[in-house]
Every structure is written in structure tokens, then in C-alpha cells.
Amino acid sequence: MSWLLGALLLIGVGIILRRILRLGTPVTSLLAGLPPLPAGQDAVYQPIAQEVETNASILGISLNDAFEERDASRLEIAWHMVQLSAGEWARMAATVTALLNAMSKYVGGAASPPPGRRIASEHYKAQVLTGSLRTYELLDRLAFGPQLRFQLRIRLLRGAVERLTKEFRRTYRYMELTQDHSSEIWLRYDLYFHDFDLVAKETLLAFRDLLACLPASALNELAVDIRALVKHGVRASVVQVGR
């Protein structure tokens, strides 16, 4: 019953976080040092930014609780917290992927190319991303023009979500079958979440860059898509982690 109480507590924390974020408090962790967006662009940005930040907060809390239970040798409870984390991971992956797909849809209509910001590959830790990051760095140096560089960013981020989610699921299924609580397994969860959180933040930064380049007509269309994504889509869907 203790694990059930923990699960209920986690859900309660998630609800509180969601209510706090929905009260209109801007997401500041991604805006530090950046100029504020104009009101029209910010109105499109904030709902999905809050959604992603909520996903990441709940996922981080559940994984942190799993680590604490594991460190206290309460392995059954730790496994139940991993199960909760897996469901939240799937929701966050769906959110970020849907946002990246929306960006791919609208980047062609940008009035000017989005900034060619380079992703800092040295900040990532999971070995599963090493190859794609090296390829990205090479192509980014060869790419001509900011629009192509922006498309490379989107492609890298989408691939990173897919790879990290695949490896998280692989580790999850292995733990489910073996109940292996070795340090190696838990280190994987730590590294995967670290990089997944970075990918989510990079996605929001890229989205912010794109918003600044869209004409009013495309911005209005994108706003409709984002509202539908937040209201009807990814958090309401149930994704089977083991599939």
C-alpha cells in the first residue's frame, strides 16, 4: 500500500504543478538572458512551453523518487515509481515529437530563416546519441544558410527523442523481466533523463526561434495547431511503454 500512497502523492504534486503553471506564470528557465517575445508570439509559445515543462517536472520528480527508494533498498516501491516514470516519459515524448512535427510543417512558411543556432553536443551524456551528434556537427559545418541549419536541428532533436525513448523502453523492459537494480541500470535512467530534458529545452528554444520568423497568417494557423495539441492530444493519450 505504501507504493500506492507514493503514486497518489506524485499525482497530487503533478496536479499542483499543472495548476501553478496554468495560472499564467511564464516559463522563466528557458528565457533567462533572452529578449521577450512579442505578445502574439508569446501567446502561442507559453501553452506548449508550460506543457513541456509540466511533463519534465513530473517525470523528474517520479524518477528522483525512484532513485530515493532504490537507495533505501525499497526495491519494489522503486520499481513502481519507475513504472509511473515510464508512463510520463511516453507522454513527454509524444508532446515533444508533436511540437517538432508542427515546426517542420511551418518552417517553410517563415518570412525569414530562423537563426542557425548550434546545439551544444558536449552537454549530452548518453552514448546512444554520440553517433547522431557527430553527424549533426559535421553537417552543421557544411550546411549553407540558416534555414538548412534549422532543419538539421529539428531532425537531430526528433531523432534524439526517438533514440532516447527506445533505449529507455529497452531498459524498462529489461528491468521488468529481471528486476535488475544494479548501478548500471540506474545510471542509464539518469543519463537518458538528463539528455531527454535537454532535448525538450532545445526544442522549445527552436520553437521560439521559429515563432519570431513567421508571418501573421502562419502564426495564426500554428496557434490553432498548438491549442489542439495541448487540449486534445498528448497528455490525454495513453501510450504503452512496452510496445
Image (cartoon, rainbow, N blue to C red):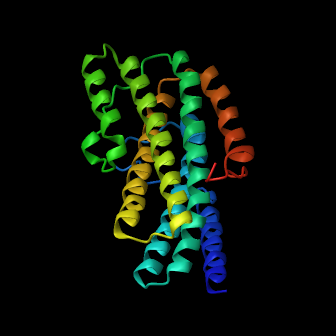
Q: Nearer the viewer, residue 112 or 9?
A: 9
Vertical placement of 67 versus 128: above or below? Answer: below
Q: Is residue 10 above or below residue 174?
A: below
Please name the residue shown 35% across and 41% down the image. 129
For the point 43% across and 39% down, which residue is it?
160
Query: Does the rendering let one see residue 6?
Result: yes
Judged left or right of residue 158, residue 7 is right
67 vs 159: above or below: below
Task: Determine the image quadrant of residue 35.
Answer: top left
Q: Is residue 130 left or right of residue 225?
A: left
Residue farthest to the top?
144
Q: In this orientation, does residue 26 appear?
A: no
Taking the spot 60% from the left edge, 66% from the top edge, the residue there is: 84
Q: Residue at 46% x, 39% y: name it.
A: 203
Q: Looking at the figure, which quarter contains the N terminus?
A: bottom right
Q: Give percent across and percent down for residue 137.
A: 27, 29
Foreground residue among 117 and 61: 61
- Residue 88 percent location from the top left of the image: 59, 58
Q: Position of residue 234 (x, y in %)?
A: 67, 46
Q: Quadrant of residue 225?
A: top right
Position of 116 compared to 171: left or right? left
Closer to the camera in the image, 76 or 27 = 76
